[in-house]
Amino acid sequence: MIALTKRLFLALTLMAVCVASVQAGPEEDLQQYVDKNTQRLVNKLNEERGLYERDPEAFYKNMDEALDGFVDFRRIAARVMGRYARQTTIEQRNEFVAKFKRSLFDSYAQALVSAEDFEIKVNDATINPQNDNRASVAMEVVTASGNRHSVTYSMHRKDGSDWMMENVIVEGVNIGLSFRDRFTQEMEANRGQVQAVIDGWGDAVKSLNLEDEVNNS
């Protein structure tokens, strides 16, 4: 496998959690909607590159507003916490959702805005035949230098109407699982003190070397 540059990989990771929701429909419509909304988001990110350099807080605010109601951060964060979520209060879960989302931007936004240009192609969308509220979307990221990298979105239909992204696989590496493993490691290191893990989550994400997992897969 051609090794991913750190900047490109981190950019892909952030892009993965920025896919917009799409309205329910058959597989062909799902693919079309994902493609339309993904391209919309890529354009939005390209427009905001300069803003990030001038005012990172404004960049975060604009992107947060663009993603509001589109990405199921609460579902993703609950999966990252795994079995430890049962040990938390509602306030702690809310705090972790906010910390999880912000940590992604703080850790990966610089990589995104400085990565080489790339385009995203949506190749296929498949609704689970055993559960029509679950689907997977196969995508390909093509860099300006011609390298191609596979990305797969796992999606679920929230409340029977909207499709929302709940996980991503980059070059065979399950990103959600990698975050969950990191949360477990932090819980063990902090002797089961979940608040300590929540408080330090930003640093934990920065030290998580997902690029090595992809390049070694």
Image (spheres, rainbow, N blue to C red):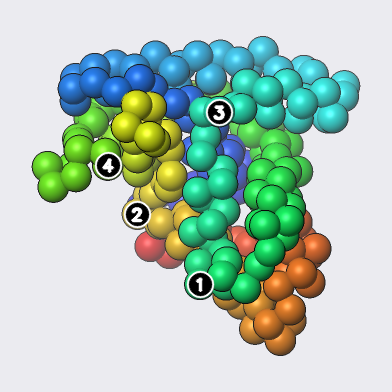
Q: Which numbered disc, 2 or 3, marks the residue that appears first in the sequence?
A: 3
Whether the residues at callouts 4 and 2 have beta carbons within 8 Å, the answer is no
Identity, as a three-letter code, of the amino acid under mark 2: Gly
Left or right relative to 26: residue 23: right
Q: Which numbered disc, 4 or 2, marks the residue that appears first in the sequence?
A: 4
For the residues carrying marks 2 and 3, which lies nearer the camera in this image?
3
Q: Nearer the viewer, residue 72 or 117?
A: 72
For the residues carrying marks 4 and 2, which lies nearer the camera in this image?
4
Q: Nearer the viewer, residue 142 or 139?
A: 139
Q: Which numbered disc, 1 or 2, marks the residue that appears first in the sequence?
A: 1
Q: Which numbered disc, 4 or 1, marks the residue that appears first in the sequence?
A: 1
Residue that mark 1 sits on? 83
Residue that mark 4 sits on? 134
Q: Residue at x 44, y 18 (%)?
A: 37
Q: Which mark is residue 69?
A: 3
Identity, as a three-letter code, of the amino acid under mark 4: Arg
